[in-house]
Amino acid sequence: MFLDSLARGGAPKGTLRSRFRGADLEGRVRAKTGHLSGVSALSGLGDSAGGEIFVFSILVNAPDGAAMGPAGRLQA
């Protein structure tokens, strides 16, 4: 039930619709996004080609008004 509640990468609807697109990752990454002023987060899990499950969490904190920069692009 929990996994089904997470958005799927590349799905037509949801917060990950423009992320993880392509034959290799589409539908294999499930995650939750989060945003506050100066903070961005992406946490979830992905299935490897070999069937292993990997869990990840990317948290980026930037000073007020600053761009997230390279760390923010990791979430794209």
Image: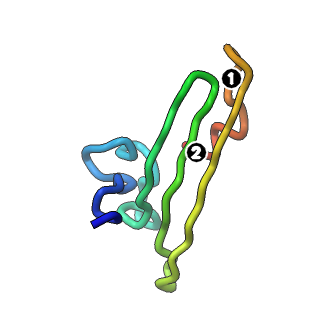
Toward the front, the furthest residue is 2
Residue 56 on image: x %, y %: 59, 61
Q: Quadrant of residue 14?
A: top left
Residue 32 on image: x %, y %: 44, 49
Q: Mark 2 belongs to which amino acid?
A: Gln
Quadrant including the N terminus = bottom left
How crowded pointer 1 is (Cα within 10 Å; few <14, some 14-19, many 20+) is rated as few
- Residue 34 lies left or right of residue 57; in this view the side is left
Name the secondary structure under disc 2: loop
Residue bearing the label numbered 1? 67
Q: Quadrant of residue 66?
A: top right
Mark sitting earlier along the chain (1/2): 1
Q: Mark 1 belongs to which amino acid?
A: Ala
Seen at 44% across and 62% down, the residue is: 29
Seen at 67% across and 14% down, the residue is: 65
Residue bearing the label numbered 2? 75
Cβ–Cβ under 8 Å for marks 1 and 2: no
Toward the top, the furthest residue is 65
Residue 10 on image: x %, y %: 36, 52
Residue 73 higher or lower than 69, as above or below: below
The label on residue 2 is none
Toward the bottom, the furthest residue is 50
Seen at 52% across and 82% down, the residue is: 52
The chosen color scheme is rainbow
- Residue 48 lies left or right of residue 62; in this view the side is left
Name the one closer to the observer, 60 or 19. 60
Name the secondary structure under disc 1: loop
